[in-house]
Image: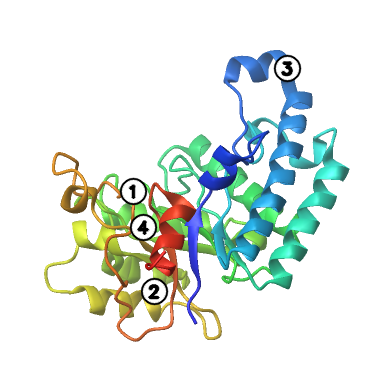
């Protein structure tokens, strides 16, 4: 059976519990400058405790995949996670989170920010991106999750300057500098803009070079499908890039413009999942829904009679 997941925020726990459950506690740069790493540590510990609550809730509600928030550690670009004053307690709680997820065979993922650009022409941006990706992998290591594409860290190339070929080469060159904790989990997703990468571009320019698995995003492909390819062909191409024994992950949302607001951009994500069934063309894939109503939309999709 395929897994189905949602991303980062649990609306039910965030709105119906006091204090609210969230892994997105953060602060402004000004507050960080004033209160420093001690306050970051306090917020991080609260976020990690609530991560356990969310994973526990998912298990109880039949949800077996979840994208963790990249905001668990506020302003972690400015410090090392191991330097947090509450690190020992944080480390212990992260292991509990990992143990709980593994005991229920729940698949956990990450999707770092669009500012994490290892293909940038700016060396300082690349350096910061490598640190960000390394910290995502460190969190997974602290959770004792396998260094495997079963627990992927999903990124985009996030640049096409000055052209796709050059950007792809820079991505591959920077990928080779990543620690094994990142490379063993990093997967690459197609884009929605015409100036950026289709799945076919990624296959030809990146996967063939370094073997990185490709995440297929249905909506992005709809917005930017190569003229000579159709959805099933592109999905199968991405599917073929994942190693044997690891079920590929795909991303899904309907277009807000087509289903909820005709004034929206075609690439905007919907609040809800409108199609009664995602077409998988007979392939075994795990589906991560990128919709604004989060777990509420997923539960409605899985239980349409409720």
Q: Does 121 sit left or right of 60 as displayed?
A: left
Classify mark 3: residues with Cα within 10 Å, few (<14), some (14-19) or many (20+). Answer: few
What distance separates the C-alpha of mark 4 from that of mark 3? 40 Å
Circle 2 sits in a helix, a strand or a loop, which is it?
Answer: helix
The vertical placement of 200 against 70, above or below, is: below
Q: Nearer the viewer, mark 1 or mark 2?
A: 1
What distance separates the C-alpha of mark 1 from that of mark 2? 36 Å
Label located before the other in sequence (4 or 3): 3
Q: Residue at x 56, y 85 (%)?
A: 245
**Which residue matches tag 1?**
271
Tell me if label 4 and label 2 are in contact, CB under 8 Å: no
**Which residue matches tag 4?**
168
Classify mark 1: residues with Cα within 10 Å, few (<14), some (14-19) or many (20+). Answer: some
Q: Residue at x 44, y 37 (%)?
A: 122
The tag on residue 208 is 2
Circle 4 sits in a helix, a strand or a loop, which is it?
Answer: helix
Q: Nearer the viewer, mark 1 or mark 3?
A: 1
Circle 1 sits in a helix, a strand or a loop, which is it?
Answer: loop
What distance separates the C-alpha of mark 4 from that of mark 1? 33 Å
Label located before the other in sequence (4 or 2): 4
Inspect this view and state whether residue 29 appears.
Answer: yes
**Residue 76 image position (x, y, % from top left):** 66, 35
């Amino acid at each position: 059976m395929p897994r189905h997941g949602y991303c980062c925020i649990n609306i039910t726990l965030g709105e119906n519990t006091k204090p609210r459950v969230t892994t997105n506690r953060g602060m402004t740069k000004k507050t960080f400058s004033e209160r420093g790493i001690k306050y970051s540590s306090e917020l991080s510990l609260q976020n990690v405790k609530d991560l356990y609550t969310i994973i526990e809730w998912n298990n109880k509600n039949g949800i077996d995949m979840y994208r963790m928030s990249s905001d668990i550690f506020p302003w972690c670009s400015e410090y090392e996670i191991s330097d947090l004053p509450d690190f020992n307690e944080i480390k212990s709680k992260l292991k509990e989170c990992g143990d709980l997820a593994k005991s229920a065979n729940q698949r956990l993922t990450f999707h770092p920010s669009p500012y994490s650009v290892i293909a940038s022409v700016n060396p300082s941006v690349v350096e910061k991106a490598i640190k960000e990706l390394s910290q995502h992998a460190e969190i997974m290591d602290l959770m004792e999750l396998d260094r495997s594409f079963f627990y992927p860290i999903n990124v985009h190339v996030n640049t096409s300057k000055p052209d796709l070929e050059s950007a792809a080469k820079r991505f591959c060159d920077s990928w080779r500098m990543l620690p094994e904790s990142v490379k063993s989990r990093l997967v690459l997703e197609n884009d929605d803009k015409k100036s950026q990468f289709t799945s076919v571009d990624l296959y030809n320019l990146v996967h063939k070079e370094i073997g990185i698995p490709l995440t297929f995003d249905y909506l992005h492909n709809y917005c930017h499908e190569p003229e000579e390819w159709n959805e099933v062909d592109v999905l199968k191409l991405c599917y073929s890039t994942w190693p044997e024994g690891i079920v590929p992950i795909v991303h899904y949302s309907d277009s807000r413009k087509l289903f909820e607001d005709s004034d929206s951009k075609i690439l905007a994500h919907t609040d809800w999942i409108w199609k009664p069934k995602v077409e998988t063309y007979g392939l075994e894939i795990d589906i991560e829904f990128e919709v604004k109503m989060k777990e509420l939309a997923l539960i409605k999709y899985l239980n349409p009679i409720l």
